[in-house]
Image (spheres, helix red, strand yellow):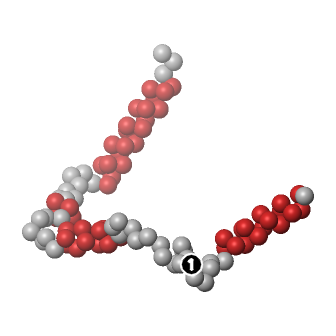
Amino acid sequence: MAGLVGIAALARVLARRRPRHGAPSASSEAPAPASDPAEELRRKLSATRATPDEPSESQDIAPPAEPTETLEERRSRVHAKAQEAIEAMQDPS
């Protein structure tokens, strides 16, 4: 009995895999999505590229300011700050 039930189940699985000649296949006619997300993004991108009147983010960034101190001055300042931190950690209070 169990063998017959197994054979019947296998026959059903195989029948579902093979499309019938007269019936349309469900996989061949996939429903079209409501809207293509990739196409929508392409449309938005082309719309934003078409408006050159607005300044871009790269134009809003100011050029870096010239350093007011030399490299040696900065090194000595950082060194002094580090020495203060070391002394604060070594302080027993």
Is residue 30 depicted above or below 65 in this figure? below
Residue 89: x, y in percent?
Answer: 49, 27
Is residue 4 depicted above or below 78 in this figure? below
Residue 12: x, y in percent?
Answer: 72, 67
Q: Which residue is mark 1?
A: 23
Residue at horizontal 32 percent and vertical 55 percent from the top: 71
Residue at horizontal 72 percent and vertical 68 percent from the top: 13
Q: Residue furthest bottom?
A: 21
Q: Is residue 63 visible?
A: no
Is residue 26 depicted above or below 21 in this figure? above
Judged left or right of residue 3, residue 65 is left
Under mark 1, the amino acid is: Ala
Question: Depth check: 24 or 44 in front?
Answer: 24
Residue 1: x, y in percent?
Answer: 90, 58
Regarding mark 1 in the picture, which secondary structure is present there? Answer: loop
Question: Depth check: 11 or 63 in front?
Answer: 11
Residue 80: x, y in percent?
Answer: 37, 38
Location of residue 40 by image quarter: bottom left
Question: Depth check: 85 or 18 in front?
Answer: 18
Location of residue 54 by image quarter: bottom left
Residue at horizontal 35 percent and vertical 66 percent from the top: 34
Q: Is residue 21 visible?
A: yes
Judged left or right of residue 31, residue 44 is left
Question: Depth check: 84 or 64 in front?
Answer: 64
Judged left or right of residue 75, residue 2 is right
